[in-house]
Amino acid sequence: MNFQEHAIYHIYNRSNETLFRSREDYLFFVQKLEAFLLPCCDVLAWCLLPNHFHLMIKVKAEGVAWTDSKFRRKTQRLTEKLSFLAGAYTQGFNRRYGRRGHLFAHSTKAKRLNDESVSIFNDFGQVDYVTTCFLYIHQTPVMAGLVNDPAQWEMSSFNDYTEGRSGSFVNKEMAYQHLALAPHEVEIQSTSYLDDVLLNELY
């Protein structure tokens, strides 16, 4: 991964087994996410599902800075912190459940999102990959058959945008600077059909 300052990315990874077995597992991952990533990026949207996770982030200057270590290859700090996030969660998970070995199927992936308008989206004007990714992340629990409405899934940022949930780490003000949505449109559009062509560009 080669991150660029101020760019927006879709971050994702999955496991070949259940990644979150309990609510405590989800909360433990969120705790590690906040600790490792917030110094390097702003989180605009997130969702944790039983065997994978999605984040949409905007990179800070700290995220593109290079590590300075005599003992390992230099890497950007955000790349390093994503690795630390996966490693710390795996270690805690393994201790809790008495297991060993890797938990994630592969290294965490990052896809830069083009913020150019690419098509007409229902009655709300132009849509771009940033907006598509934002809506997709919140729709994933419904698409996976876990709930019937995004609001029913606790482990995502959807309710931060629609119900004003407090204590969240998402930067809503920054998100609205990039979304082709007004605040009152988020709930409506989060249940709308997403174009398959645009979805294919999120990975």
Image: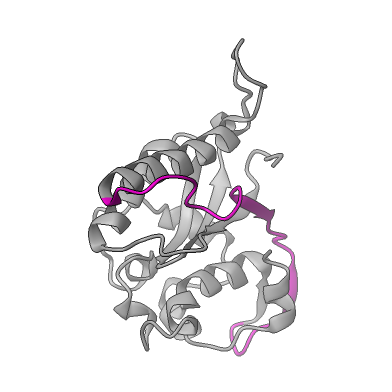
Q: Residue furthest top?
A: 70
In the depicted structure, whether residue 113 falls above or below residue 64:
below
Check the picture and name the quadrant holding the C terminus.
bottom right
Total of numbered circles in the picture? Answer: 0
* Left or right position of 50 against 55: left
In the depicted structure, whether residue 174 falls above or below residue 73:
below
- Magenta: main secondary structure equals loop
- Image location (x, y in percent) of residue 29: 35, 50
Which residue appears at 66% of the width and 22% of the height?
Answer: 74
- Image location (x, y in percent) of residue 67: 60, 21
Q: Which sits in the foreground, 168 or 19?
A: 19
In the depicted structure, whether residue 35 falls above or below residue 70:
below
Q: Which residues are magenta?
A: 97-124
Check the picture and name the quadrant holding the N terminus.
top right
Which residue appears at 69% of the width and 61% of the height?
Answer: 115
Kindly indicate the quadrant of the structure image that contains residue 198. bottom right
* Left or right position of 161 against 131: left
Q: Which sits in the foreground, 116 or 50?
A: 50
* Left or right position of 147 against 189: left
- Image location (x, y in percent) of residue 202: 67, 66
Which residue appears at 60% of the width and 52% of the height?
Answer: 106
Tell whether position 98 is magenta.
yes
In the depicted structure, whether residue 54 falls above or below residue 147:
above
Tell whether position 109 is magenta.
yes
Kindly indicate the quadrant of the structure image that contains residue 149. bottom left
Q: Which sits in the foreground, 178 or 51?
A: 51
- The image's colour scheme reads one colour
* Left or right position of 38 against 10: left
- Image location (x, y in percent) of residue 86: 47, 44
